[in-house]
């Protein structure tokens, strides 16, 4: 089975307009709709090796954008009546991994949108899912999948989709997760998790050993409200997008807050229930502004971007 492919000419994304009133904001692209370059509540994103940005929205449609926001291709998941996938990943071989949330599985596509692998089914056993949230793929092809709704855990799979182990579930004590919405691999093979409903970030070894946590619920510096996604800046600091606080917060690895970007609203530089953040080379930060059906692009290198909460 394949996804429904839609290919076309590049549609202009970012305009050349500047936003001097919003420090670091480079451009904004996307609007409400079902056409190429339009969104129906975008909820996850991932970068490809050539710098292209993939975005999946609530209609189960994946779109590819050039680095400056021009839409160049799209395809739809093979089953989309339930829709609502919430996670995307790109493997070292360029394959695209989708947390097909409401179908309780992971689907893997070629770069052209051809389905090449699927694994998982609805259930409670090893390798089963209820609602998978996100997918992260290690350099060796190992696959990590987050899950919530009663079985809040992370499962690890071989490159061909065979179950290996799970961690963070009901019996995990201090490591027990509540909606692990975003997964991020480190250079050393460890895993960082946006533990959304615990309002914290967790750090795990590849075998599921808890290495540390930081964050608590709130609106102040170092506090979080429903962190949904995270990525690295080039200096090794983390950016975490907060669905509940309508902002992106930057952290040192030990959890010290280094400032925030964004605030609730509809104007450029403001956010409405953002779900994801991904960082391209040069610290070009793409913020998936879900409630506004758009993507905002920020140059995260400028100190003026980050303000004290």
Image: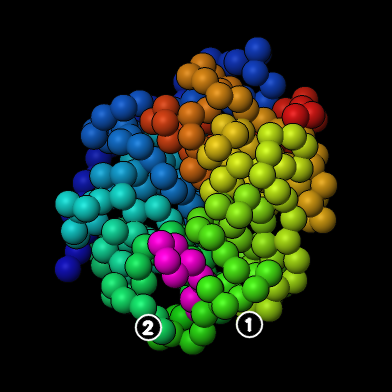
**Residue 233 pos. (x, y %):** 71, 48
**Residue 74 pos. (x, y %):** 28, 46
Q: Is residue 204 left or right of residue 255?
A: left
User: Residue drawn 37% across and 83% down?
Assistant: 125
The image quadrant that residue 151 belongs to is: bottom left
Q: Is residue 26 left or right of residue 239?
A: left
The disc label shown at residue 207, or none:
1
Residue 292 lies in the magenta stretch: no
The disc label shown at residue 125, or none:
2
User: Residue drawn 79% across and 29% down?
Assistant: 308
User: Residue drawn 61% across and 54% down?
Assistant: 198
Q: Residues within 10 Å of mark 1 (few under 14, many from 20)?
A: few
Q: Quadrant of the C terminus?
A: top right
Of the two numbered discs 2 and 1 on the same chain, state the one appearing first in sequence.
2
User: Residue drawn 31% across and 50% down?
Assistant: 84
Residue 151 lies in the magenta stretch: yes
Q: Quadrant of the N terminus?
A: bottom left
- Range drawn in magenta: 147-156
Can you tell which of label 2 and label 1 is closer to the viewer?
2
Viewer-proximal residue, 15 or 297?
A: 297
The overriding secondary structure of the stretch rendered in magenta is strand
Distance CA(mark 2)–CA(mark 1) = 19 Å
Viewer-proximal residue, 292 or 73?
A: 292
Secondary structure of the residue carrying tag 1 is loop
Q: Residues within 10 Å of mark 2 (few under 14, many from 20)?
A: few
């Amino acid at each position: 089975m394949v996804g429904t492919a839609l290919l076309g000419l590049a549609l202009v994304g970012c305009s050349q307009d500047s936003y001097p009133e919003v420090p670091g904001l480079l451009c904004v692209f996307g609007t409400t709709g079902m056409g190429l370059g339009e969104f129906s509540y975008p909820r996850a994103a991932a970068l490809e090796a050539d710098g292209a940005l993939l975005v999946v929205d609530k209609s189960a449609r994946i779109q590819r954008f050039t680095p400056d926001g021009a839409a160049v291709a799209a395809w739809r998941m093979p089953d989309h009546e339930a829709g609502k996938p919430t996670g995307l990943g790109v493997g070292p071989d360029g394959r695209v991994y989708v947390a097909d949330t409401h179908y309780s599985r992971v689907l893997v596509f070629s770069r052209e949108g051809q389905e090449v692998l699927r694994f998982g089914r609805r259930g409670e056993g090893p390798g089963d899912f209820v609602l998978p949230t996100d997918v992260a793929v290690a350099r060796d092809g190992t696959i990590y999948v987050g899950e919530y709704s009663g079985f809040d855990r992370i499962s690890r799979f071989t490159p061909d989709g065979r179950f290996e182990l799970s961690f963070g579930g009901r019996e995990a004590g201090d490591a027990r997760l509540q909606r692990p919405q975003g997964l991020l691999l480190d250079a050393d093979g460890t895993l960082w998790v946006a533990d959304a409903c615990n309002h914290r970030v967790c750090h795990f070894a590849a075998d599921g050993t808890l290495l540390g946590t930081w964050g608590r619920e709130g609106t102040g510096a170092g506090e979080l409200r429903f962190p949904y996604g995270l990525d690295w800046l080039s200096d090794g600091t983390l950016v975490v997008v907060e669905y509940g606080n309508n902002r992106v917060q930057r952290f040192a690895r030990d959890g010290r807050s280094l400032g925030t970007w964004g605030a609730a609203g509809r104007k450029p530089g403001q956010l409405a229930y953002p779900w994801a953040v991904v960082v391209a080379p040069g610290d070009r930060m793409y913020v998936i502004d879900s409630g506004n059906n758009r993507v905002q692009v920020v140059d995260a290198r400028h100190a003026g971007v980050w303000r004290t909460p």
